[in-house]
Amino acid sequence: MGAGREKRAIRSSLKGRFLLAAGGLLLAVLGFLNYQGYAYGRHRIIEGYSRSLSNITEVVKSGLTTVMTSGNESLFRNFITAGMTENLKVMRLINPDSGKIISSTMASEDNYVMKNPPLERKIVMDGRGIPLSMFVPIYNNKPCQGCHGAEKEILAVLNVELVNQEAADRLRALKNRAMISFGAGFLLIFMPLSLFYIRFVDKPLKSIQKSAKAAAGGDFTVKFRDGRPEGARGMDYRGPDELGRLCADLNHVFGNFRRMKAEFESRSAETVAKMEKMATLGELAAAVAHEIKNPLAGISGAIQVFAEDIPGNDPRKEIINDVLGEIDRLDQSVRNLLAYARPPILRPVNMDLLSVVERARRLTEKQADSQGVQIVMPSMAAAPAVIEADPEQMQQVFFNIFQNCLRSMPSGGVLSVEILPGAGEEVEVRISDTGMGIPADSLEHIFKPFFTTKHSGSGLGLAISKNIVEEHGGRIEVESRPGLGSTFHVIMQSRMAASRKDG
C-alpha cells in the first residue's frame, strides 16, 4: 500500500511526470536509433558472409567442374578434400534425383540420403539468421555430356557449409555494443536533463511553494524567490525567465495585497470605532429620551390641569393648546428616538398583509381627508398575501411610509397602495404618491436617521421602517422623480415560500 501510494505521488508530481515523460521519450528515441544501427550492422555482417559463401561456392563449383571434366575420380576426391579450409565445415555432392550424397568431406556422410535437396541456387540460414550453407546445381553442360549423356539437366547439387561461429561472435559483439551505446547514451542525456530540471525548475518551484504555504498560513509579508541567488541590485529573482517573472508578479500582487490589508485594517478600526461611538450615542440618546419622556408627561399633565381653570374665550387658551401640541410632537419624537435606538422585539405570526395595510390606511385616513389626499387601493388578488411577521411592527412600517407620502402632498393628491407578487416567491407592497418627489441627491439618504427635507418630522420614520423590514428578512426600496411623486417598494418573503423551505 505504501509503495503504491509513493508511486502514485511520483506520477502525480510535476517532477515525476516530467522525468517519466522525458525518460520515456528518450528511451524510445535512443532505442529506435540503436536498433536501426544494430539492424544495419547485422545486415552488413550477414550480407558479407552470404557474399563470402557465394564466392567460395562458385570457386568450388568451378574447380569441381574442371576436375569432373578430366574424368579422374580420385583427382575429384582429392580436390574436395584439399579444398577444405578453416572457414569450411563440409562440402558435399548430392544426387539431384535420389538425394544420395555422392561425395562428402565427411566420410561418415557417404551414401547418406538428403531428402528434397534444393535444385536451384539457395542460401540456407541457421536459427539465428546467419548463413549456414549454400546449394548450387551443377548443370549438364556440353563438356559434361560426353561422359553423362544429354538426358539429365542437372548432374549434381553442390552443397558448401560454412563454420559460422565467427559470424555469431561478431553479431553478439555488435549487440553488446548497441546495448552499451544505448545505456551510455541514455545516462549521458537523461542525467544532465534531470539535473537541469531539478536545478532550474524543481528547486525554484519548491521555493515558490514554500512561500505560498507561508502566505496560506497568514504570513503576507513573505517574499517569493525562485531559489537562485539574488541579482546585483538585490532583486528577488535572477534573469528574465518565466519563473523569475512569476516571482516578481507574485511579489507585486502580495505587495498590493499588504497595502490593501493595511488600509482595510485601518478603515476597519475606524469603522469599529465609529460603530462603538454610534452605539454609545444610541445608548445615550435612549437614556436621554427616556429621561425626557417622564418629565414631558408631567409637564403635559400640569398644563392640562392649568388649562381647565382658563375660560374658553381667554386668549391664553390658544397659547396653552399650542404648547400642548408641541409637547405631543416632542413626545412623538422621543418615542421615535427610542424605537430607533432599541432594536424591535419581533413577535411574528402568520398575518395577512392586506389587513395590516388596511389598518394603517384607517389611521391615516383622517389626516389624508384634511389635506385633500385620496387613498386608492386597487382590487387585490383573491388569494391572501400571507407573511410571517409582527403585525404591530409592520403596521408601523406602512403608517410611517403613508405619513412620509402625505407630507409630500400638502395641497392634495393621490396615494396608491397595491399588493403584488414579487420576484420569485416574494410579495411586494407598492406605495405611490403624486407629491413633490425626492431630489436625486437626497434619495440615497432618506433611510438615514434624522435626515429630512421637511420642516416637520423627526427624520426617523423611514429609518425605523427600514430597520423593521430588514429584521423581518425583507427589504425596502424607493424610486422618485422630482415633481412627479415617489414609489416605495416593501418586499417580503411570502409564507408559502417559507413553508416550502421548511419542508
Image (tube, rainbow, N blue to C red):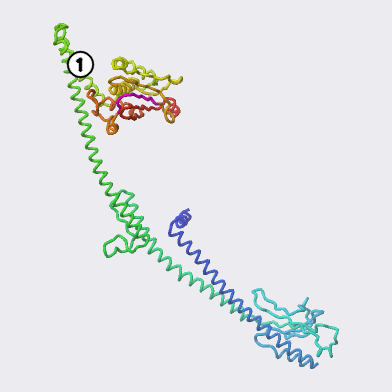
Q: Tell me: residue 147, above or below residue 205.
A: below
Q: Tell me: residue 496, above or below residue 233.
A: above
Residue bearing the label numbered 1: 325
What stretch of residues is rendered in magenta?
428-437
In magenta stretch: residue 496: no
Q: Residue at left 41%, top 20%?
A: 378
Image quadrant assignment for residue 390: top left
From the viewer's side, name the closer residue of 50 and 442.
Answer: 442
Q: Tell me: residue 282, above or below residue 321.
A: below
Q: Residue at left 20%, top 27%?
A: 285
Which element carries disc 1, helix, strand or loop? helix
How far across and down, in percent of the image, does residue 164 sit? Answer: 64, 80
Q: Amino acid at mark 1?
A: Gly
Image quadrant assignment for residue 101: bottom right
Image quadrant assignment for residue 100: bottom right
How far across and down, in percent of the image, does residue 310 sit? Answer: 14, 7
In magenta stretch: residue 435: yes
Left or right side of 488 for 304: left
Mark 1 nearby-residue class (10 Å; few <14, some 14–19, many ≥20): few
How far across and down, in percent of the image, does residue 388 sit? Answer: 38, 24
From the viewer's side, name the closer residue of 125 and 38.
Answer: 38
Left or right side of 46 for 441: left
